[in-house]
Amino acid sequence: MNFSLINRAIFLQLFVIMSILMIIPASVAFLERDYFVAQTFLYCSCAGVIVYTLIAIALSNVIKVQNIFEKLLSFILSYLFLPFFMALPLVLSVADVRLIDAWLEMVSSFTTTGLKITNLETFSGSALKLWLGMVSWIGGIFFWICAISILLPLNISRYDIGTYDLVEGFSLKGYESGNSVLSNARQLIPIYFIITIALWLFLTLAGVSGFQSLLMAMSVISTSGFEITNNDVPNVFIIESIILIFFVFALSKSLFFPAINDIRKFRIFNDPEIRLALIIILGMTGLFYAKSIFTLISEDTEINLAVLVTQLWGIFFTVTSYLVTMGIESKVWFDLPSFALAEVSTVSVMGLAIIGGGVATTAGGVKLLRVYILYRNAAQEVDTMLHPNSIPSKKGKGSISDNRNNRLMAWIFFMLFITALAFFTLVFSILFDDIAQGLALSVSALTTTGPLFGNAGYDIVLTDINQIFKIMLGLAMILGRLEILVIVALLFPSVWSK
């Protein structure tokens, strides 16, 4: 009989892992003498392990290696059904939380959206807050691993790891031979864990309490948007500076893959994602800073060096946060008469969130590399129109923007994203009777930038909306996390054959 966890479906692997990890919040609740919550987590953990054991016994004589299609299907099912199991401790511990609300909360966490569904301030103790942080943190690494292990072999968009952006002579065969979930997990989990611990330590040294800094670290690394800095936290500027440094990990996949870094010799500024991100951040910061100074002058506000630096930092941090789809705003601005979105307009931050961070990272949105490919394709088309007899220029051998398949898939994904955005905007506009609120909620869900909806000034309790709209909101967050193209991949017979 074979009880190996490794040979099971990804859905079952993650199910038993989450069951075991429930022991951690159970232990925290026990230490806080919140025995009812500890008991709830412990019982759910034991139930999950028992269910997995029974399934493993039933499948013990079934020796079968999953193909790519089965892995993809299991990957999608994880986002649809696992949040129900993750929500059980929340439902059993808090009397006022219904299953549909808890499921939506867990979908928001697991997809790293960070959209506020239930009221965390009403929770007694730290166990439930820790569980939400853990779910979002695990959701980040889970998508990261599956993007490399499952989506790459589908050949939907191989530029997700930069394979067309490498110099001539690099072979993908070696990479594909080790593209199993297990081998990639062994490579990526230590990196993910180390940078989380590093951020946790830095935030703790900056004056944040140990538990709060842990939640902030998991939130920042997974770009989930939960647990932002409070107004009473000391050294806000230092804390935001530390967080800003770690935002870079959501801008490009080249920071994580040794094969790419060895060839590039760690020249990250040669990465088109990094270059485009810098151009967008600096350009948007300059525009909004000029607007901010003009507003201060027109309102006869006293301008000094502290005000100028504070305005510049607040805009710079906020723009970067929305670009990596984190969605938290600078607290340095809190004491100023103008708040973040008063200067950085809602439509602008929506555009930043739609552009998104790097491919094969925890960030959402269309992604920087796809935007870069579309820009290069548009530039070549305009050049061809102006000079019909010219030969299109290329930047280096095997450039990702010069690959016809990459340009086609980038355009298809962009159109699918816009179509999904229009559909969900229409659905949520019916709910709110206001297209502005519907658009804000749609962008928040599809780009996994949950705080955007609340920061835009819409004080709507999502637990009070119709259950049908709750299901639609959950599906929008899942679709945004799966990047839409994954769902479409299920429709291609070529994927079935793999």
Image (spheres, rainbow, N blue to C red):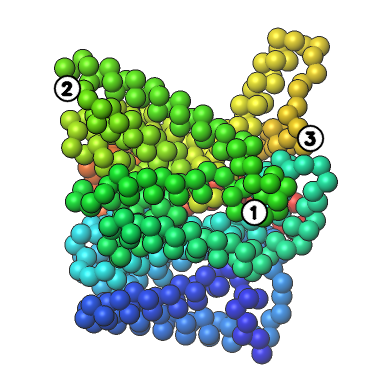
Image point 45% across, 55% down: which residue?
A: 222
Disc 1 to disc 2, how far (Cα)?
A: 49 Å
**Pointer 1: residues within 10 angstroms few (<14), some, or many (20+)?**
few
Q: Percent from the top left, x then y, of residue 95?
A: 21, 69
Q: Which quadrant is home to the C terminus?
A: bottom right
Question: Would residue 279 appear left or right of 431 to someone viewing this image?
Answer: right
**Pointer 3: residues within 10 angstroms few (<14), some, or many (20+)?**
few
- Pointer 2 residue: 302
Disc 3 to disc 1, how far (Cα)?
A: 20 Å
Relative to 8, residue 426 above or below: above
Which residue is outermost to the right?
169
In which image quadrant can residue 241 be found? top left
Question: Would residue 436 appear left or right of 153 to someone viewing this image?
Answer: left
Which residue is outermost to the front?
305
Q: Which quadrant is home to the N terminus?
A: bottom right
Q: Nearer the viewer, mark 1 or mark 2?
A: 2
- Pointer 1 residue: 257
Q: Nearer the viewer, mark 3 or mark 2?
A: 2
SS of the residue at dot 2?
Answer: loop
Image point 41% across, 82% down: which residue?
A: 47
- Pointer 3 residue: 397
SS of the residue at dot 1?
Answer: loop
- What amino acid type is highlighted by mark number 1? Phe
Q: Percent from the top left, x then y, of residue 404?
A: 74, 33
Q: Percent from the top left, x then y, of residue 19?
A: 44, 76
Choose the circle earlier in sequence order: 3 or 1.
1
Relative to 299, residue 373 above or below: below
Q: Kindly check if marks 1 and 2 are in contact, taking CB atoms under 8 A apart as contact.
A: no
- What amino acid type is highlighted by mark number 3? Lys
Relative to 261, residue 309 above or below: above
